[in-house]
Amino acid sequence: MENCLFCKIIKGEIPSAKVYEDEEILAFKDINPMAPVHILIIPKNHIDGADMLNDENSAVVSKIFAVASRLAKENSLDNGFRIVTNVGVNGGQTVRHLHFHLLGGKKLNTALC
Ligand code: 5GP
Ligand code: ZN
């Protein structure tokens, strides 16, 4: 999608530190890490956010979770990790392209909101 930051990262127009890629999914390091491991996992097909998921486009989400599990193992997150997706203004979503934060490498704050 035009003018979408993450679509530009997918197309290679903006550089990123990629850690996983296949036909449907890209994972790269967050530019402003909130934990020792902070990876963003995104579908290559533009979806605005979790509020726009439906029966037709949501299969990729299970694949994203499988990639998250794989990346957690690769990063030795044996003591646990967190997967977060922010949605819309109230959810704190700043990039309107569906993405899942994989956070770990320290004891994370337990506050949910
Ligand atoms: P959100 O706030 O939408 O849930 O998460 C967006 C995330 O994208 C933020 O954690 C932010 O640090 C990250 N981010 C924003 N711009 C860039 C960028 O150009 N490159 C990378 N790697 N991450 C970015
Ligand atoms: Zn996009």
Image: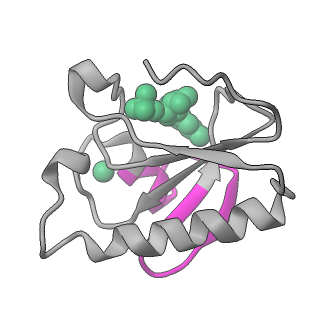
Above or below, 101 against 44 in this view is above
Residue 52 percent location from the top left of the image: 14, 52
Above or below, 94 against 67 in this view is above
Left or right placement of residue 101 versus residue 58 in this view: right
Residue 104 lies in what quarter of the image? top right
Closer-to-camera residue (9/94): 94
Residue 14 percent location from the top left of the image: 52, 45
Residue found 60% across the figure and 44% down from its top = 82
Residue 48 percent location from the top left of the image: 22, 47
Residue found 41% across the figure and 72% down from its top = 62
Question: Where's the C terminus, which quadrant?
Answer: top left
What color scheme is it? one colour
Residue 5 lies in what quarter of the image? top left
Residue 2 percent location from the top left of the image: 22, 48
Give yes or no for residue 26 being in the magenta stretch. Answer: yes
Residue found 64% across the figure and 32% down from its top = 31
Task: Please provide the residue range marked out in magenta.
Answer: 7-27
Give yes or no for residue 91 being in the magenta stretch. Answer: no
Left or right placement of residue 66 versus residue 61 in this view: right
Q: How many marks?
A: 0
Residue found 70% across the figure and 29% down from its top = 108
Left or right placement of residue 10 versus residue 36 in this view: left
